[in-house]
């Protein structure tokens, strides 16, 4: 006979504990551990009938802490969020709390209110009860942690802390928060992050001026770390008790936090509130800065002539006090073919570099201006030196000004690429992407990802380049200009993978989205057009190459000539002798025109040394040497550059080299997760079904599919499904729709 029994140890039930000890002597005790996070996700999906939203799953995982009953209650509670804690959870927790004595209950409430501030010193100051604390630890209600020589405590389960806190009256909570503040400040008066949550909840039991200062500091630190919701909570709370003249500065931070996550209407509302407060209380400088914020966001969203004029007017009025406004003017000028205006803007920026009395923010802006001026004059060596100086000054800026480093990084990345340092180009692109402090304007995050996508392409990692551009596209959801740029870049990358139908569709969407003139966006669109034309053997039509394009979109300007062979040599020579990547590429086309094999071989060697394997491999095809062609073929296969694979095979065959048909494993087997995705695709599941089955987002599924296309050298969903079912190679024909898509506005065959 099998007898099963279950009990929870440590619940102040000695008879049950004694029975458990007796049974253990002759039976087997199995400890039921909490569910792992993956199990919580699976249980939540079963209960909901679909994969839970990421924020809901994160909330459930954090609060349930692996307890199945709590997971179930929170899942159902998540569908009806009117109740903070589900009733069944509250009842279970209260049953446990009612077994505690008054001192133990008071101590548990103190730990729950103190949160991260619950150190041994704080508990002794508020509720010095070591015997009660020991019992709470023994019974598993409180956990004890060491941090160096100090001890800290927390309620063992998040929901126990929530219920204990919720059962207190508001007056009781405020009194405990005020007591925690007094205890913490007795040990460390400047521990802002520990003090801020308690000042926010202590109400009128603390000095309002001190509360406003602490919460404002905490909000700005949260904003600097992109913890936007936390920043808004603290800054809003600070504004409620602050001196009226301080409100505009607080609403500035609130608006920037909303802007950073794409809540543009909320940002505008916050800044308008701040302008009203500044006008009402006589703070004109603060009002001017907020008007600049509004004008900049309006120009980013609309980019109309009126919006640009308004931005220029507002920026001109405050540029002496806020030098970063000049950078924004420079960005807008270079979009619209105004070289004279660009030189004027960068010259004004450059003057800031010479004034040693200026703060580091102004010096960073100044050297960025000198960088652009040197680039205008094709003096790329000087430009690099100035750019590195600008970055050095930007690195010294306060976190709130850290967007300067991001802006300078996205200039240095293509500058390094153009001068033959592709590794440096990737590093600076990563620096921009990984800048955790930039919340200045919404396009920064999207454009940084775009720059990283371009740098990844130069290294030959097309799949990674597409992953980055997909992220850029998500970040540009409300920014039409950047949607167009990212769509055009993805069209280019898909064309390089041989997915010409999909590339043509992206290109058509990019043209549709791009309703206002922007030279940078047009340059990327032209790059996509040229690449699709080259790979579909269509006539490229007349092309225009101008040196000024380098400032509108440096990466597109340096890459596009490669895909228009008839124009490449002259276009690349226009960059000058210090642009060593452009020189090497130009030498390739010169060598082909003149038949100079030595120059071609030298160009290949230089391109490889620079870290540009795809460009080097393309040049190797021109060498028409068996060994070089096979090396190029291997590079193209690793990159998943299907059209170039096909060219390499054709060249190899023309040299008498017999190469087996493309296998299904061009670069080795798929990863485990990629194999899972492709297997379900072969079973006929949609992307949404695959995502649900594997507990992934649809975007992640799409990324795995794209990587699989690239690794297997396949270009269609049907071919990939066939490979998944049969594990055999398959080639898919290019749709004739590509040629129709090339007939869009701005492209002639």
Image (cartoon, helix red, strand yellow):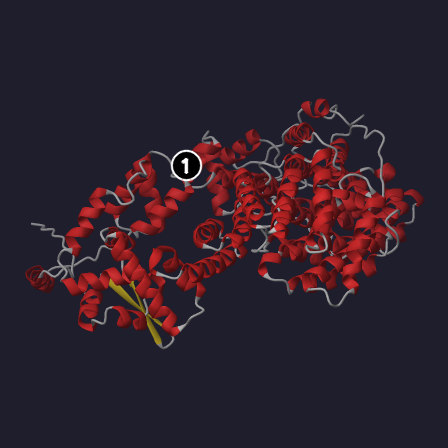
Q: Residue furthest right?
A: 594
Q: Is residue 257 left or right of residue 315?
A: left
Q: Is residue 500 left or right of residue 70?
A: right
Q: Nearer the viewer, residue 361 or 685?
A: 361
Q: Is residue 450 above or below residue 168?
A: above
Q: Give the position of the C terminus as an image quadrant.
A: top right
Q: Is residue 617 above or below residue 191?
A: above
Q: Is residue 402 left or right of residue 422?
A: left
State the image coordinates of residue 31 (x, y, percent, origin top left).
21, 58
State the image coordinates of residue 484 (x, y, percent, origin top left).
67, 35
Q: Residue at x 41, y 72 (%)?
A: 188
Q: Could you tell me which secondary element the residue under label 1 belongs to?
A: helix
Q: Is residue 97 visible?
A: yes
State the image coordinates of residue 313 (x, y, percent, origin top left).
73, 43
State the image coordinates of residue 151 (x, y, percent, origin top left).
32, 72
The residue carrying mark 1 is 692
The total of numbered circles placed on residues is: 1
Q: Is residue 630 visible?
A: no
Q: How would you rate the neighbour count of disc 1 (Cα within 10 Å): few for under 14, some for 14-19, many for 20 or more?
A: some
Q: Nearer the viewer, residue 720 or 389?
A: 389
State which quadrant residue 262 falls in.
top right
């Amino acid at each position: 006979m099998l007898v099963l029994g279950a009990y929870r140890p440590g619940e102040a039930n000695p008879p049950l504990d004694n029975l458990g000890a007796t049974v253990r002597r002759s039976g087997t005790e199995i400890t039921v551990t909490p569910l792992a996070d993956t199990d919580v996700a699976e249980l939540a999906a079963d209960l909901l009938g679909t994969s839970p939203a990421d924020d809901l799953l994160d909330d459930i995982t954090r609060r349930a802490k692996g307890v199945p009953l709590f997971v179930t209650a929170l899942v159902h509670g998540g569908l009806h969020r009117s109740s903070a804690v589900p009733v069944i959870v509250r009842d279970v927790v209260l049953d446990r709390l009612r077994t505690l004595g008054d001192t133990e209950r008071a101590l548990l409430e103190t730990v729950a209110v103190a949160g991260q501030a619950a150190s041994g010193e704080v508990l002794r100051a508020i509720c010095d009860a070591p015997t009660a604390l020991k019992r709470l630890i023994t019974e598993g209600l409180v956990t004890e942690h060491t941090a160096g020589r100090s001890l800290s405590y927390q309620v063992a389960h998040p929901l126990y802390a929530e219920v204990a806190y919720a059962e207190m009256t508001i007056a009781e909570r405020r009194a405990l928060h005020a007591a925690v503040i007094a205890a913490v400040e007795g040990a460390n008066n400047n521990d802002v992050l520990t003090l801020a949550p308690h000042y926010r909840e202590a109400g009128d039991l603390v000095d309002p001026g001190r509360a406003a200062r602490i919460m404002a500091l905490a909000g700005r630190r949260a904003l600097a770390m992109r913890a936007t919701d936390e920043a808004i909570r603290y800054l809003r709370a600070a504004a409620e008790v602050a001196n009226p003249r301080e409100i505009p500065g607080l609403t500035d931070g609130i608006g920037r936090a909303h802007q950073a996550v794409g809540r543009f209407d909320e940002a505008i509302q916050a800044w308008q509130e701040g302008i009203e407060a500044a006008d009402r209380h006589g703070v004109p400088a603060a009002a001017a800065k907020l008007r600049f914020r509004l004008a900049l966001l309006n120009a980013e969203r609309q980019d109309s002539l009126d919006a640009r004029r308004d931005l220029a007017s507002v920026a001109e009025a405050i540029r002496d006090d806020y030098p970063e406004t000049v950078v924004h003017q420079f960005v807008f000028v270079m979009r619209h073919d105004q070289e004279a205006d660009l030189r004027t803007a960068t010259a004004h920026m450059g003057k800031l570099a010479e004034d040693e009395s200026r703060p580091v923010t102004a010096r960073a802006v100044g050297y960025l201006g000198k960088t652009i001026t040197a680039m205008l004059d094709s003096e790329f060596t000087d430009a690099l030196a100035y750019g590195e100086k600008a970055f050095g000054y930007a690195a010294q800026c306060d976190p709130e000004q850290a967007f300067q480093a991001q802006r300078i990084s996205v200039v240095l990345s293509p500058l390094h690429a153009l001068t033959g340092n592709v590794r440096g180009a990737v590093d600076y692109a990563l620096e921009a992407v990984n800048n955790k402090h930039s919340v200045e304007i919404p396009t920064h995050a999207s454009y940084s990802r775009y720059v990283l996508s371009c740098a990844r392409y130069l290294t030959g990692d097309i799949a990674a380049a597409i992953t980055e551009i997909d992220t850029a596209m998500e970040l540009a959801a409300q920014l039409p200009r950047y949607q167009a740029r990212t769509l055009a870049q993805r069209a280019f990358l898909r064309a390089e993978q041989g997915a010409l139908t999909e590339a043509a569709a992206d290109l058509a969407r990019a043209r549709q989205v791009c309703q206002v003139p922007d030279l940078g966006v047009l340059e990327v669109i032209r790059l996509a057009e040229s690449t699709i034309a080259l790979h579909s053997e269509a006539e490229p039509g007349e092309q225009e190459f101008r040196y000024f394009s380098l400032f509108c979109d440096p990466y597109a300007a340096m890459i596009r000539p490669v895909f228009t062979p008839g124009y490449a040599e002259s276009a690349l020579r226009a960059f000058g002798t210090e642009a060593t990547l452009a020189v090497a590429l130009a030498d390739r086309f010169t060598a082909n025109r003149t038949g100079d094999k030595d120059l071609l071989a030298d160009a290949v060697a230089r391109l490889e040394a620079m870290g540009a394997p795809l460009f080097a491999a393309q040049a190797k095809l021109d060498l028409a040497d068996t060994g070089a062609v096979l090396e190029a073929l291997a590079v193209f296969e690793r990159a998943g550059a299907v059209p170039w694979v096909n060219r390499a095979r054709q060249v190899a065959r023309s040299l008498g080299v017999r190469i087996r048909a493309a296998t299904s494993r061009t670069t080795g087997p798929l990863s485990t997760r990629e194999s899972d995705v492709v297997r379900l695709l072969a079973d006929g599941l949609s992307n949404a079904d695959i995502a649900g089955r594997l507990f992934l987002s649809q975007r992640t599924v799409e990324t795995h599919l794209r990587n699989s296309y690239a690794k297997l050298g396949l270009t269609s969903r049907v071919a990939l499904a066939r490979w998944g079912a049969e594990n055999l190679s398959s080639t898919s024909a290019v749709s004739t729709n590509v040629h129709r898509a090339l007939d869009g506005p701005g492209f002639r065959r």
